[in-house]
Image: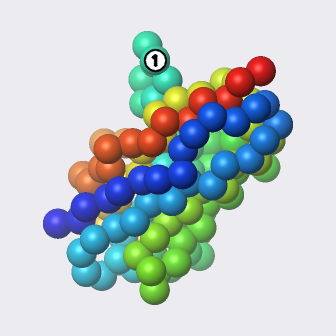
Amino acid sequence: QVQLVESGGGLVQAGGSLRLSCAASGRAFSMYTMGWFRQAPGKERQFVAAISGSGGNTGYAGSVKGRFTISRDNAKNTVFLQMNSLKPEDTAVYYCAATLGSIPYTQASVYPYWGQGTQVNVSS
């Protein structure tokens, strides 16, 4: 069982930056692929980024590639999402997710463990 707690959300102006964190409880954190997803009001949850257990493989949605960076610190059981050049369309609740595996999965259905989410608002 893995419990996930996100933090770091908030209100930022367009062009600004935020860094989200997701702290995981449980053992063998390095065995879990970690993902970030987001859901805007009235829209489906969408993939943002994912990172393999070792941190050696990452994947990004096209809409955030070049602006967002996912990373992890396995010694601290934490995964990060650095978000730069934020746009109003990045406004959403951001969720951290975990699944056993070795590749950066993009499908939400693959992830059995989810955090409660953190709100990100980007003003124009």
Q: Nearer the viewer, residue 122 or 87?
A: 122
Q: Residue furthest bottom?
A: 75
Q: Nearer the viewer, residue 119 or 2?
A: 119
Disc 1 element: loop
Q: Position of residue 102 (x, y in %)?
A: 42, 71
Q: Position of residue 42 (x, y in %)?
A: 43, 13
Q: Residue furthest front?
A: 11
| Vertical placement of residue 46 versus 54, above or below | above
Q: Left or right? Give the position of 115 relative to 85.
A: left
The quadrant of the picture occupied by the C terminus is: top right
Rate crowding at label 1 as few (under 14), some (14 to 19) or many (20 or more) other CA atoms within 10 Å.
few
Residue 25, can we see it? yes
Q: Residue at x 50, y 66 (%)?
A: 79
Q: Residue at x 34, y 67 (%)?
A: 24
Q: By what rule are the colours in the image chosen?
A: rainbow
Q: Residue at x 63, y 34 (%)?
A: 11
Q: Residue at x 56, y 62 (%)?
A: 80
| Vertical placement of residue 69 versus 88, above or below | below
Q: Nearer the viewer, residue 76 or 113?
A: 76
Q: Left or right? Give the position of 53 relative to 111.
A: right
Q: Position of residue 89 (x, y in %)?
A: 66, 24
Q: What type is the residue that disc 1 sits on?
A: Pro
The quadrant of the picture occupied by the N terminus is: bottom left
Q: Which residue is mark 1?
A: 41
Q: Residue furthest top?
A: 42
| Vertical placement of residue 48 versus 31, above or below | above
